[in-house]
Image (cartoon, rainbow, N blue to C red):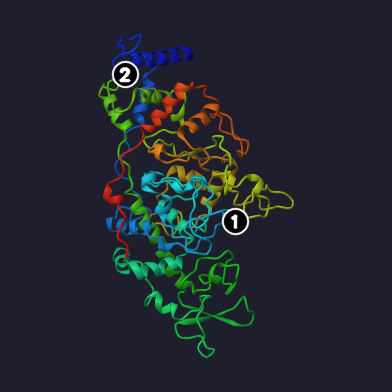
Amino acid sequence: MRERHLAVVELARMCAAIGFAVGFAGCQGAGGFLCGKGSCGWTDVDLARVEALAGLPTAAPPDTSNVYAANLDAAALGKSFYFDTRFSGPSTLLDGLNRTMPFGRTPAGQNAGVACISCHSPGHGSADPASIPGDVSMGAGWTYNNALPTFNSAFYNLHLWNNRADSLWAQAVADNENALTTNGNRLHTAWLISDLYGATYQTIFADTPLPFAGPSSAVAALVGTNGQCTLAAGVCPAGCREVPSTANAGSMDCWPQFPLQGKPGKTAGCQSGSTTEPFGDAYDCMAPADQMAITPILVNFGKAIAAYEGTLILGPSAFDRWVTDLAAGNGDSSTQISDQAKVGAQLFVGKAGCSDCHNTPLLSDGQFHNVGVGQTGPGVPKESDCAAGTVCDCAPVSDTHMNGPKNCLPWGARDGIQKLQANGFLRTSAWSDDTTAVTTNEATYLKADLSTIPLGAYRTPSLRNVSLTAPYMHDGSIATLADVVWHYNQGIADQDTPGAPAASYKPLYLSDDEQAALVAFLESLACDPPPADVLMPPMLP
């Protein structure tokens, strides 16, 4: 049967090359690749599978966990946040294992000058062009994954390569304080919003008032380089409060009510002045009520960005337009995609089996799979880098290591789901506007036994716009679409792939022509961009 299929495909290729138009047994029409149901290697099942891949909705699905998701004013504010590099902190030049990397966006210690837009360029399909040649994305530090596009991201119910966030707003909240991405912090974010966006913010988020009595410059006039208030004649001045010092036992530190910088530390409680806690543990040493006035501002920052990302919906592709012709009975004569791409479409849903995972109009099943991709490139941790008790810990439970793996970055989704289950900003949390807004898929992972999550598995990425988003795979280790197809065709796992590849990952035995046809099909998935006004950079205050 396989030999007959290959013979028919080759006959179709030759007929197209010389322009013959013959009947059922050969080619029909100028293209010759859709000879009618049941001929030229196509079946009713193939055609149904192809048609099921087209027609992505033109609007994002509702997200009731974010009441501002469809608020146009919130989206406009979120767009400003998305583009504003002032929310970022200093560049570190470190990777996820705290290793010093050879270069960065700015020298270490200088403001990284990054925002969401930095790693999600519209001209690069909203992925990160700066990941070449590093292969992973760079923010304030080097991340351990290649940035996924934000275009169409609103269609997922779990986010990032390892699924560690369950909403776009929770992802934005986490990235704000992630030392590898923007390296910001919630106090700086709240002050910046108050100083630059205060009136707009208060209009949209009227139920979450800004708690500051004046501008950040008033606090800046009170504090020294350590962020603490300068004593006046040895006394903590008005507007500041004394806190027992950890750095200098028996003495008192003097902090402003709302420090200019700060986020939750590694250790619970106040360790005032500690050099191992962020900004001397300024946030954790605030009064609890004041902490509770700041964190909602960070959450609203994330919800506004999510509202904007909900407008980043791609239009149709040449493939979608061809499927429209196909449904009308004109698929063979349609010139929306090339004849080579039509062969690729049949291979995609048939012999190559790509649509087993890249299904639905998003061209992703939203699940995670181990497809034999290793941990390749600088900044990408291997299991051998992750010993017990280190930053990246992949060691199993033992007599000397009772806690088991923690932050085992190379394990992909198994590590991500562990982080998801511990995430404080879930749809089910107090920060959600609808704690029942949980999909079946998400609910399964929130209570999943981690041992059942395949090692080295990552979320299936959407293939829409895939020709624009190189490099590929979670570690950015594959440079071109042709190389991606070759990887799947070989069906051989990289030697440093954690765990075992999925059973479906095996050699495909595609010829060179068939591989080229698959690439042509993938290129036909380039989509119309979101509206120009959505992508146009905003005027920032």
Relative to 405, is 86 above or below? below
What's under tag 1, amino acid-wise? Thr
Tell which of 485 and 199 is nearer to you.
Answer: 485
User: For residue 215, which quarter of the picture?
Assistant: bottom left
Place residue 506 in its image quadrant.
Answer: top right
- Tell me which residue sits at (65%, 48%) in the image: 385
Q: Position of residue 490 (x, y in %)?
A: 55, 27
- Total residue callouts: 2
> Dot 2, crowdedness within 10 Å: few (<14), some or many (≥20)?
many
Q: The residue under label 2 is which amino acid type? A: Gly
Please tell me the numbered disc located at residue 31: 2
As drawn, 125 above or below 13: below
Q: Dot 2: what SS?
A: loop
Residue found at the very far right of the displayed protein: 399
* Residue at 62% over, 39% down: 496
Secondary element at image label 1: loop
- Which residue bears the numbered disc 1? 100
* Marks 2 and 1, the one that precedes in the sequence: 2
Q: Residues within 10 Å of mark 1 (few under 14, many from 20)?
A: some
The answer to whether residue 338 is left or right of residue 166 is left
Q: Position of residue 404 (x, y in %)?
A: 66, 50
